[in-house]
Amino acid sequence: MGSGNIFGEPISTDAPPSNVAKENDHPVPRLGVTGKGPFQTNKFYSSFYLGNQSSPVYLFPYTVQWAQGRGGSGSWGMAVSRPKAEDRVYGQTDAATGAAKYYINPVGIHSLVLSAEELGASTALTMDNLTDSSVRVSLHATPQSQPVIQFPLVQGAGFVTALYDGSVPQIQTGVFYKTVTRSTQEAKVGTTKYKLHLEDGTKWLLYAYHTKGGALDLQVVNNGLAISKKPFYGVIQVAEDPGNAESMYDKACGAYCTGVELSGSVGDTSGSYTFNFQKAGMPNATLVMYALPHHQSSFDGATKGKMSNNVTLQTTTKGLAAAVLADSWTMTEQLPNNLGFVPWSPQAGSVATLSNNAKKTIQNIAIQEISQNMLEQTNQDSMYFSGKVSMIRSGEIEPCFDVACANHICPGIG
């Protein structure tokens, strides 16, 4: 394996060539974004600065959404859900293949909402610490006030974590509580645990780690609201329990991920890359993070040994996520060293010659593509659709009109 970090240094920091035009603004406003840029504009948390900031954000496996006083909970906090496979709605069946032409996951479900008594119609949402894989979202009672709750959001996090600094927590639901039970024993010293059973049959665990003041003491007001009896200082975390995750969550509670540092190296025919998860909260607790199938298939032996094949949660479009109790993951890949300009596949290697039929097919598609009006084809009324329209017209993939890519699957696009 080669030495050094292949992600440690930029390829270049030179300015773009003078013939590349430069703009000093951006057509999309920096809604709710604080701090100095530059800011990336195509990340998992983009819904929090687009439109009215109310569209879902997909963490895999959880979905979070600023409730904005709407939905089943009527809350102004951060709604958490984890759409189930059985809740999907399928499109019509393709006669040729027998497969559904698409499926859609439900949105707007408020399984649990992490909120506070101070939040209401004047609530504002802001973001800072924007990176590739993480963001910190703050909810303010008014646009000018200090944060009431802060949410460090990282894709793959085992818990959805809320940080309170003296506000009065409200734990709400639009699905309705069946039972709310406080555990008689602390999961860790200073950590209170609640078991929340919802009317849809799901089971959630809530952990509250107080940094000062007293422990979280919830009073159930009705089947949609539990409220703290006093202000709370510390960390509240929620996670769905598929039925066998409680002991793992007990070990991991109190710590939360704030970001991911990527490092990697390559050798002749293999490469390795590592996610080092940045951590806050209880220093002696190990993080629980959920790995997607493409992570799982590449884990090295040490990381695979920390993965639970029994603690899994279904994601919207990325398959079954498995829990990993570790502060870092390392993945390895075999790298082909015989790639060239000609077609290549893992099975056949480099294909030096093409059949006449293959050449004819390529020629026909090329003629169709270059004969189009590219300016017209890439300036449609949908940012999502425009980039694909030329391929759709040439018959390579089927059209898709839904911008919520993380929420549905289309054939040919995936």
Image (tube, grey):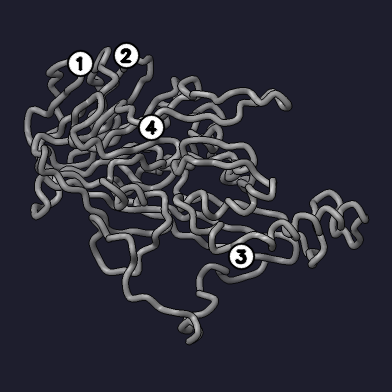
- Give me the disc on residue 412: none
In the rendered image, the vertical position of residue 185 relative to residue 142, given as above or below: above
Q: Give percent across and percent down for residue 2.
A: 66, 69
Depth check: give the residue in front, 296 or 213: 296
Q: Which residue is mark 4?
A: 249
Q: Position of residue 147 (x, y in %)?
A: 15, 50
Of 56 and 279, the residue lying toward us: 56
Q: Amino acid at mark 1?
A: Asn
- Cα separation, mark 1 vs mark 2, equals 10 Å
Front label number (3 vs 2): 2
| Disc 2 crowd, CA 10 A, few/some/many (<14, 14-19, 20+) | some
Q: Quadrant of residue 295?
A: top right
The CA distance from mark 4 to mark 3 is 32 Å
Mark 1–mark 2 CB contact (< 8 Å): yes
* CB-based contact (under 8 Å), mark 4 and mark 3: no
For label 3, the residue is 265
Which tag, 3 or 1, sits closer to the chain's start?
A: 1
Quarter that holds the N terminus: bottom right
Q: Amino acid at mark 2?
A: Glu
Dot 3: element: strand
Q: Which residue: 36% across, 49% down?
A: 45
Amino acid at pointer 3: Ser
Residue at mark 2: 199
**The C terminus lies in which quarter of the figure?**
top right
Q: From this viewpoint, which residue is outermost toward the bottom? A: 18
